[in-house]
Amino acid sequence: MATDVDVQYFSHLNGLTLGNNWGDLIRLLDKALVAGIELTQITSASIDEQGDIHLTLYAAHNCMLFQIIELSDFADVSVDGVSRHINGKYRIKGVPVNNQLILKGIIRTVDNPPIVNISSLGSAKLASLGYDRVFRDTNDVKRVYRAKDPSAAHPFIRVDESLTSPDGTSGVYTSTYAKSAMVGLIENMTHIDDYTDTSKVQLPLSGANVALNFDITGTGTGVTRGWSKWYWTRSNSVNNAALETAAQAAGNRAFTLIGDRDAFYFIRPSDTSTTLKMLSGCGLFDAAHKNDVVPNWFLMTTLYRAAASATVALSSTVPHGGLPFALGAAMSRCFLPRFDEATRISDHVYATPQMPDFRSGNSNLYSPNNLAALQIPLVDQQNYLRGTLKHVYYNGKNYGALAQATPILSDTSMYVADGIYINDSGTIGSPIFYLGEIE
């Protein structure tokens, strides 16, 4: 069985920055979803007795265990008398020092094989999650992403950091206010602002105003910007109320972004805390019903529309959905298209994750286990069992108040955990993400 090389993760530890600046989120998404991160020059490479590939780089690489490296421009190499392709994707198996990597490689076929030195060197990068940037606006504040080589089920993912309405005057959001991207999923698009067509499934969706999710109205402290938002800077931590108008602390945010071309998840704080973080995400879930009419999309987001002058607590003011996996069933919800094949263009519904409790990674329900990961089914407000979330699992083991992405190996299964805020006492838990098998 080959090692899985589909689910990738990125962290601030890779040298990526998510600071208190407009544009930081979409530039992070450009790298993690689309481009990947080029590593410095490879100065030597070899294949050891087990078939693992050893790389030495010119400078520190900032890579982490179990991340995916993509090699390119290497010439074929003779291994055990057979010409082998070196180019492709590999899991990081070891990080001996900060400029060396060991990649889970190829199977050796002879007894006591010699080390193979690779003389024709190519390049390496941290592989992206596997998306295309379909549209980018001329002002460089909006993006539309979609899975590479998509199926019909894959949505267009629109991420909008705009500060003004299209006319530039009827809605103006002050640049010093809290920073968030307006995020939505759309069935198909022919240009970057193609979201007003009432014949398309969208998530979220208000049938009364299909443009509501990306609508900016008003000025000054009375401005109202968007509906479904991924915050990354506010004036207060996730467990406290904040005004959008209040100043936010400078500095880079700790984050983890993880997933593949089907779905990804984004963990980050709303201030400079390293543990009081929140979870967002979007993409496809594994459907329990056919999805040819109603798509199997999910969106984890802060769904709330209010003027910038309103005091908002993500843990209480937002009626549901602001903090998946935290604070009980009401707050922990995510959003799905309504399961109604007769009226497929309908307002969205919320869905509640079915878990033993809402203290993933904290309650330690299964403490004797070395690892305790449970798949998470979704039941919507119509009481349909819709399916299960991809990649993310309920964590029945307490790993402490995690402040960053933490790789975990259980037998041959690879996981990554990171801390999130889960209740009003400031308790930290953690979902755990399955990366696949390393063989």
Image (cartoon, rainbow, N blue to C red):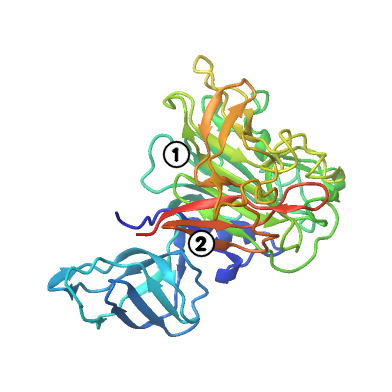
**Considering the image in quadrants, where does the C terminus appear?**
bottom left
C-alpha gap between disc 2 and disc 1: 20 Å
Which residue extends farthest left? 81
Disc 2 residue crowd, few under 14, some 14–19, many 20+, Cα 10 Å: some
Which residue, as the protein is rendered here, is positioned at the far front? 368
Q: Which residue is mark 2?
A: 31
As drawn, is 137 to the left or to the right of 246? left
Kind of residue indicated by mark 1: His
Q: Residues within 10 Å of mark 1 (few under 14, many from 20)?
A: many
Residue 433 screen position, x and y as percent: 53, 51
Indicate left or right for 261 with 400 as reference. Answer: left
Rendered image quadrant of residue 226: top right
**Who is closer to the viewer here, 48 or 380?**
48
Residue 116's place in the image compared with 191, above or below, is below
Q: Position of residue 339 (x, y in %)?
A: 54, 22
Q: Is residue 274 left or right of residue 370?
A: right
Q: Which residue is mark 1?
A: 154
Question: Which part of the image, by quadrant, shows the N terminus?
Answer: bottom left
Looking at this view, is 326 or 126 the one in front?
326
12 or 426, which is in the foreground?
426
What amino acid is labelled 2 in the image? Lys
Q: Kindly give the residue lying farthest to the top in the view shown.
A: 342
- Is residue 319 at all visible to an observer of this figure? yes
Q: Position of residue 254 (x, y in %)?
A: 66, 64
Residue 44 at x, y percent in the picture: 34, 84
Apparent side of residue 130 relative to residue 373 in the rendered image (left or right): left
Mark 2 or mark 1: whose residue is earlier in sequence: 2
- Residue drawn at 49 percent across, 32 percent down: 296
